[in-house]
Image: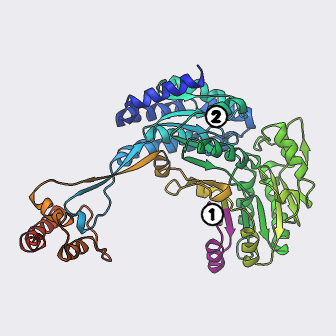
Amino acid sequence: MTYEDLMSRAATAFQSGKTKDIDFRRKQLNALLRMYEENKDEMARVLAADLRRPKQESYILEIEFLINDIITTINSLDEWTKPMKPEKGIVNMMDDVLIYPDPLGVVLVMGAWNYPLQLPLVPFGAAIAAGNVAILKPSEISVNCANFIAENIPKYLDNECYHVVCGGVQETTELLKHKFDYIFYTGSGRVGKIVYEAAAKHLTPVTLELGGKSPCYIDNTVDISKATRRVLWGKFINAGQTCIAPDYILCTKEIQDKFVKEAKVVLKEWYGDDIKKSPDFCRIVNQVNFQRLTKLLSSGTIAVGGKTDADERFIEPTIIVDAKSTDAVMQEEIFGPILPIVNINNAFEAIKFITARDKPLALYIFSNNTNDRQTIIENTSSGGVCVNDTIMHLAVDTMPFGGVGPSGMGGYHGKYSFDTFSHKKSCLVKKIDTISEKLSNARYPPYSDKKINYLTFLTKKRKGFSIPYLPQLVLLGVGVAATIFVQRILPECEQ
């Protein structure tokens, strides 16, 4: 099937109205949940095949994450799809004010290779929930996971409304030539620019989930033993191939020495004397990324780790001390198990260092000094902030996850995923009866000062006053007051 045929088929499916039906959406979401639950072992296998991912990391970071996300969506579907009823002022006291969450149409979801199941399938599920027809493009780099998605989506979901396209640069380039109603992309900033440029030709809105160098500030007020464990876990899960992994540490020389000493103890506890033999440490996804990362090892001074094995695409968890801002390791997002430490003297120097660079996807602050924490949060810009831990803010699905500036645009997770794939359609419903028409008469010519005063009264914004959908008793009182107002005052405005 050509891409032209695919797009025509997708457009026809959306125009049929099938995906707008809430029961249809629920059926598809339950089928997607069933796909996850029935294929847990297979999902763990393909993740291991692509990344040598340990079973625990696969389950917690991808498989169970997907299951919990889709359960939340199914349980919330009725609530999310209801029209919102926002507050309204006195001028609309007799009207219905509604916001409908409309599906956007035919959407494209493009996933990344580092979390090759979670990153494409979470937004894909949200696109289904919001009533769209969706085309899913998994990353070709994680080939086993891409094949799993391509083989199983057609088995579980409606074949007219949901499609999977596999392939590399050529296939992606051809796909992006077509007009979509929305594009959701997760991956590098370099490719993100290409996606954004292609979308702009059709005025297609996008979400770009990118990355960047996420800083981690540590001061002397925290328990360095606990802080070290939390930083190392966030850095070295998935061998550092995580968009929100701590990219570098900002701390004093004193904290650096304590961190390195503690890190040696922790890494031996986690992975043993020979990390390469540990079943709990991932591998770099391919030789291209392996070669890129090994070049970064020449920066600074290696205090921990540094061993590599090209045949296994293995890079030992590595800590580089006394790194300088001009070092190669500080010029790009690392996206691997290399953690440089840059020395600063205090929180203000940390702020200066962070704000001199692109806005990161995540900012980590390890401090029990409330004033310093707040100062850093208020004087830096980042996609998100996590205090005294790493990565875990991602798991709070009542908060949006996304970048800012070069680290991305738009956000998702939980309700925010549904909103991403929905258009908020405003709708005002007015009555046509004697009272409402009396209230409206003052807007018609011929104009007068009395009419101006009357309309000014109705439209004036009053602090702390609005009329949402109040209890019937209150509405009745408003109606009575309005009737009296119309009968006694409005006739004068019509003269």
Instruction: Name the residue rendered at 57%, 47% in the picture.
Output: 206
Give left or right: position of 20 versus 276: left
Nearer to us in this view, 203 or 283: 203
Query: In terms of secondary structure, where does tag 1 sit?
Result: strand
Give left or right: position of 395 versus 89: right
Is residue 379 in the magenta section? Answer: yes
Q: On the image, which quarter does residue 221 sit in?
A: bottom right
Q: Which residue is mark 1?
A: 386
Look at the image and give the residue range highlighted in magenta.
363-387
Nearer to us in this view, 172 or 354: 172
Label 2: how many Cα within 10 Å (few below 14, some 14–19, many 20+): many
Instruction: Check the picture and name the quadrant holding the C terminus.
Output: bottom left
Residue situated furthest bottom in the rendering: 371
Q: Which residue is mark 2?
A: 138
- Of labels 1 and 2, earlier in sequence is 2
Is residue 461 in the magenta section? Answer: no
Give left or right: position of 287 versus 14: right
Number of the label disc, if any, that sits on residue 266: none
